[in-house]
């Protein structure tokens, strides 16, 4: 498992894949990331110490991910990240949290005390698809409410049951409402959720321009950030 990488494009940054407790939401139908979680805080932290040693601060920007939410990292790991931020002159931190943690996001921003770009795995703005098929657990009233807590949404095109219309709308809304967003094309995994190869081909043909869109990170395959396996 590769846990450290450097993203050179768009917003250059170092990225680390850390280990934490199981995701508190844990219900998304397409999710099989949980294999990397552990309830052993010591094991998690010891792994994280080794991974975080790689950070050089070369771009002043880091992204911290785990197979869940930043709130599930050991406290000692959060202390270590803050220490690295100070020692390596990090000015911007990307991290991720699910909607259930929205009211705690500000406390995490305050804790780190630097510019934070907080991502959330919305996957789609289409409520029916998102909640009935993907079981994401987002209950926002309007997009302004998401923006109250989060800076960036992650979208997931290419799933059976999605349509071109939904994806067009997702990209349009992300482009017009957020200063940053991520597109993670769905890849077959161990769950029952199936990719739609025709839809994926259509997306690749029509949205190649996202490669040049500065505020969008596109993962055409889910290891494009260089971490994971
Ligand atoms: S919020 Fe993320 S980690 Fe948690 S179940 Fe959903 S996709 Fe998996």
Image: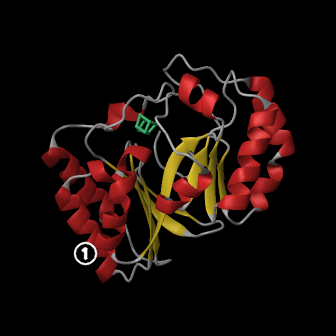
**Picture quadrant of ligand 1:** top left
Residue 67 sits above or below residue 81 on the image: above
**Cβ at disc 1 under 8 Å from ligand 1:** no
Residue 224 in view (yes/no): no
Seen at 68% across and 21% down, the residue is 160
Seen at 49% across and 39% down, the residue is 138
Residue 11 sits above or below residue 22 on the image: below
Q: Residue 97: percent from the left, percent from the top?
A: 41, 51
Q: Is residue 78 or residue 1 the one in the foreground? A: 78
**In the drawing, does residue 208 fall left or right of residue 104?**
right
- Viewport quadrant of the N terminus: top left
**In the drawing, does residue 225 fall left or right of residue 78?**
right
Residue sitting farthest toward the top? 192
Residue 32 sits above or below residue 98 on the image: above
**In the drawing, does residue 70 fall left or right of residue 29?**
left
Seen at 49% across and 21% down, the residue is 190
Residue 81 in view (yes/no): yes
Q: Residue 153: percent from the left, percent from the top?
A: 57, 52
- Residue 166, by quadrant, is top right
**In the drawing, does residue 52 fall left or right of residue 3?**
left
Q: Residue 56: percent from the left, percent from the top?
A: 39, 74
What SS does tag 1 mark? helix
Seen at 29% across and 67% down, the residue is 81
Residue at label 1?
83
């Amino acid at each position: 498992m590769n846990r450290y990488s450097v993203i050179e494009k768009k917003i250059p940054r170092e990225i680390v894949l850390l280990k934490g407790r199981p995701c508190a939401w844990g219900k998304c139908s397409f999710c099989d990331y949980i294999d990397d979680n552990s309830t052993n805080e010591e094991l998690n932290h010891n792994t994280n110490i080794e991974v975080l040693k790689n950070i050089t601060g070369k771009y002043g920007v880091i992204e911290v991910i785990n197979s869940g939410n930043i709130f599930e990292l050991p406290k000692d790991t959060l202390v270590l990240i803050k220490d690295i931020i100070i020692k390596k002159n990090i000015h911007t931190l990307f991290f991720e949290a699910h909607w259930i943690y929205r009211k705690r996001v500000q406390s995490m921003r305050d804790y780190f005390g630097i510019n934070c770009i907080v991502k959330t795995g919305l996957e789609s703005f289409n409520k029916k698809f998102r909640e009935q098929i993907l079981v994401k657990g987002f209950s926002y009233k309007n997009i302004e409410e998401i923006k109250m807590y989060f800076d960036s949404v992650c979208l997931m095109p290419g799933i059976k049951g999605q349509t071109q219309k939904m994806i067009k709308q997702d990209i349009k809304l992300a482009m017009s409402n957020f200063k940053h967003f991520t597109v993670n094309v769905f890849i077959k995994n161990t769950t029952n959720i199936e990719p739609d190869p025709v839809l994926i081909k259509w997306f690749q043909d029509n949205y190649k321009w996202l490669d040049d869109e500065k505020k969008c990170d596109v993962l055409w395959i889910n290891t494009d950030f260089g971490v994971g396996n």
